Image: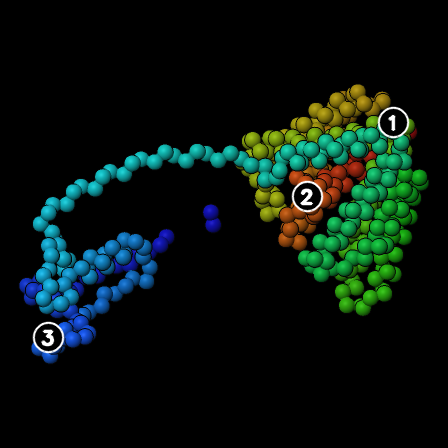
Amino acid sequence: MNDSSWGAPPQAGYWGPSEQGPVQGAAPAGPAYDAHNAQQTRPMPMPDVPAHGGDQDDDRGAARLSGPLFRDDTPSAGSLGTPSQKPQEPMPSPVPQPAPAPQKKSAGRDLGAAIGVGVGLGAVIVASLFVVKAVFVGVIAVAVVVGLWELTSRLEERKGIKAPLVPLAVGGAAMVVSGYVRGAEGAWVAMALTALAVLVWRMTEPPEGYLKDVTAGVFAAFYVPFLATFVAMMLTADDGPRRVLTFLLLTVVSDTGAYAIGWRFGKHKLAPRISPGKTREGLFGAVTFAMVGGALCLQYLIEDGTWWQGLILGFAVAATATLGDLGESMIKRDLGIKDMGTLLPGHGGIMDRLDSLLPTAPVVWLLLVLFVGSG
């Protein structure tokens, strides 16, 4: 967790030499006071009170003040700081305290809620993916719009950057649909039109901050909806649902391997200035888990796929998922926040779940096209 000094005790002899007898105190007020006593009295010296100190300091001060304050008082044994005739009893030896139990490592989140939300999202995704493809495209579009809202809200709150949300949301949803209907060509056209809409929309406000606002808007359009469009483009193939499932499984397996191995064996930081929790051991776990998962998926899920292609795909997924996670951590560190939102208990916001998926989508789409074709 993010020492107190003790005050020095009063010096020996502070109350005067011991051979002078009892020290005279101040005369009491009222009728008992007489002139004879007044001539023989002197002001009582006040002890220095330490600036810092606890109960032990108060005890020492009390011992010094226990001597007689008036002439007719009789000093008792041990007063005025003189040692008592009674021998002191030895202090009892301290009882040894048991060592504190070692603290268990914590995941830093509500693991039960995180698992529950993850299972629920997975069920919705799988159901929409294998029932009607168009429904899954709608799921992607909704995730994109919510992610854009989270990103633009945090930019405005923390940096005062007002990226226009309306053209981003409309253009982002159109980008996903265009990618599914018209492929890469449609996605690029929608991206260009969205950027143009951001430039024009921002002109309705004062020119101060125009450059940073439109720059952030174009960045958001590329970062969230354009990269998500590649998921919709995977879906257009005949085995599209299985390609998307492979993409999702490998990303989740990579994150799981990084968490499991890093939490148990992680000692060497991977990028401490960006994400102190990530370790090299965790990266090794991500690569190992993803390569094994890739070999299984390409061998049994993807038609005409082979296990060695799955090894390459798994390695690429682990690399891009880690880079995407670090990129999102860089953004959040710049903004000074832990999570992009609070929509998903145990996870944060939508953008906190899309950080690994977004940069991985174009890589998986491209490698699958190279390995087994676009059909």
Q: Which residue is mark 2?
A: 348
- 30 sits to left or right of 85: right
- 127 sits to left or right of 5: right
Q: Is residue 345 above or below residue 332?
A: above
- The amino acid on which the numbered mark 3 sits, given as a three-letter code, is Asn
- Tell me whether the residue at label 1 lies in contact with that at label 3, contact meaning CB atoms closer than 8 angstroms: no
Q: Which residue is mark 1?
A: 239
Q: Residue at x 74, y 59 (%)?
A: 161
Q: Name the mark nearer the viewer: 1 or 3.
A: 3
| Rendering coords of residue 341 (x, y %) | 70, 47
Q: Name the mark nearer the viewer: 2 or 3.
A: 3
- Secondary structure at numbered mark 2: loop
- The amino acid on which the numbered mark 1 sits, given as a three-letter code, is Asp
| Rendering coords of residue 280 (x, y %) | 60, 36
Label 2 packing within 10 angstroms: few (<14), some (14-19), many (20+): some
Q: Is residue 330 visible?
A: no
* Rendered-image quadrant of the C terminus: top right
Q: Is residue 298 visible?
A: yes
Q: Which residue is mark 3?
A: 37
Q: Is residue 367 above or below residue 323?
A: above
- The amino acid on which the numbered mark 2 sits, given as a three-letter code, is Gly
Q: CA distance from mark 1 to mark 3?
A: 112 Å
Mark 2 vs mark 1: which is more N-terminal? 1
The furthest residue to the left: 19
Give residue 80's quadrant in the image.
bottom left
The furthest residue to the right: 182
Q: CA distance from mark 2 to mark 3?
A: 80 Å
